């Protein structure tokens, strides 16, 4: 399973354990590295820059040959911590950064100065061409089977389009729950895959057992889109609570979103409210269960250690 991704990161298998808000942690990424893949954590999982720095030091100490680790940065104006997070990551060092939701130009420039590779989330060819022009090291093709904020194109259509037009490697994100899925993504032209939802139900994941068990009990047919978390459509498990509150933005949000001056602030407020609700559901027992996941939980049949999940993906 040697590809351009395994060469870029010096890993055994072309798999990135995707960064997941509230879920990913040092223990998960350490086990991912031990299993021969790369692991990634959202920088926003850490409330302070000191906590982020401690995590970086731990991962550097835990790194083994054949594994790699990185961090995900939200690079638009909604992330007020962005510049501080980038500075800390560049000071401490890691193997790669994944950028999301904004221009990666500054991240690429600063990261490349210290030898950190940068992969950029993209959902179409237009943005993929932009990040290629900014000298990104790879494009992460977020397709319509991804968990969380997903793209609009099928894996085959998006990977085919990008791999034919780009000179940088394409990594597929979304729709991978077993080895057959990985084989399909590679056959379409991807150089690797980013896998998130199957790792929610891992022993090491930093969420409640209820959340993990939900990924076992529910399947692809139970994944729906909601606007009630970030204001942008996001995939969640269709629990009774989600059914109760509905999936559409409120009428007042829709009204305010039409005002160009207020739109940015409405989105920021909705994002903040949604993230707090998601954190409560992920971290403590509550009837307000807003659990983010993708359709690849279809293949999740038990709560397993990270190593066992990787073994299922490669064998």
Image: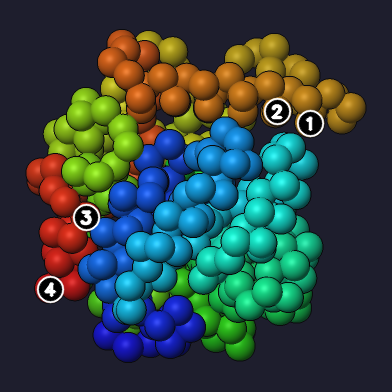
Could you say which quadrant of the image residue 59 lies in? bottom left
Q: For label 1, count other residues whose C-alpha is less than 10 Å away and answer few (under 14), some (14-19) or many (20+).
A: some
Q: Which residue is mark 2?
A: 268
Residue hosting label 4: 315
Point out residue 131 in the picture as x, y percentages from the top left corner: 70, 71
- Residue plotted at (56% across, 49% down): 53
Q: Earlier in the sequence, mark 3 or mark 2?
A: 2
Q: Residue 240: which quarter of the image?
A: top left
Vertical order, 155 against 58 (above or below): below
Q: Is residue 180 left or right of residue 170?
A: left
Q: Does the image show residue 159?
A: no
Question: Can residue 274 be seen?
Answer: yes
* Residue behind mark 1: 264
**Residue at 10% over, 44% down:** 302
Q: CA distance from mark 2 to mark 4?
A: 43 Å
Q: Residues within 10 Å of mark 2 (few under 14, many from 20)?
A: some
Q: Earlier in the sequence, mark 4 or mark 3?
A: 3
Q: Secondary structure at mark 4?
A: loop
Q: Are marks 2 and 1 in contact (CB under 8 Å)?
A: yes
Mark found first going from the N terminus, 2 or 4: 2
The residue at 47%/19% (across/down) is 277
Judge by depth and name the residue closer to the eye, 113 or 160.
113
Q: Nearer the viewer, residue 201 or 291?
A: 201
> Cβ–Cβ below 8 Å for labels 3 and 2?
no
Q: Is residue 65 above or below residue 124?
A: below
Dot label at residue 306: 3
Q: Nearer the viewer, mark 3 or mark 2?
A: 3
Gap between marks 1 and 4 measured at Cα: 46 Å
Which mark is first along the chain, 1 or 3?
1
Instruction: Give x and y (percent) for residue 75.
Output: 70, 51
């Amino acid at each position: 399973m040697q590809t351009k991704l395994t060469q870029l990161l010096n890993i055994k298998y072309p798999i990135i354990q995707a960064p997941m808000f509230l879920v990913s942690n040092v223990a998960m990424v350490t086990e991912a590295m031990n299993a021969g893949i790369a692991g990634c954590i959202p920088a926003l999982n850490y409330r302070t820059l000191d906590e982020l720095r401690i995590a970086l030091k731990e991962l550097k100490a835990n790194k083994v040959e054949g594994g790699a680790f990185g961090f995900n940065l939200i690079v638009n104006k909604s992330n007020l911590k962005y510049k501080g997070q980038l500075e800390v990551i560049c000071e401490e060092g890691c193997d790669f950064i994944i950028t999301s939701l904004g221009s990666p130009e500054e991240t690429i420039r600063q990261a490349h100065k210290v030898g950190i590779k940068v992969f950029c989330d993209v959902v179409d060819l237009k943005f993929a061409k932009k990040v290629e022009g900014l000298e990104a090291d790879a494009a992460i093709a977020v397709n319509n089977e991804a968990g969380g904020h997903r793209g609009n194109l099928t894996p085959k259509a998006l990977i085919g389009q990008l791999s034919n037009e780009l000179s940088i490697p394409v990594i597929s994100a979304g729709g991978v729950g077993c080895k057959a899925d990985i084989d399909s993504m590679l056959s379409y032209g991807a150089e690797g895959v980013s896998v998130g939802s199957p790792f929610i139900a891992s022993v090491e994941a930093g969420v409640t057992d209820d959340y993990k068990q939900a990924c076992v009990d529910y399947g692809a047919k139970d994944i729906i889109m909601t606007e009630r978390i970030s204001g942008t459509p996001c995939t969640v498990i269709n629990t009774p609570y989600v059914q109760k509150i509905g999936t559409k933005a409120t009428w007042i949000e829709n009204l305010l979103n039409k005002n160009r001056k207020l739109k940015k602030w409405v989105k920021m407020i909705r994002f903040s409210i949604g993230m707090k609700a998601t954190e409560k559901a992920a971290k403590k027992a509550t009837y307000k269960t807003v659990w983010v996941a993708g359709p690849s939980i279809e293949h999740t049949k038990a709560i397993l250690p990270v190593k066992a999940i990787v073994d299922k993906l490669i064998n």
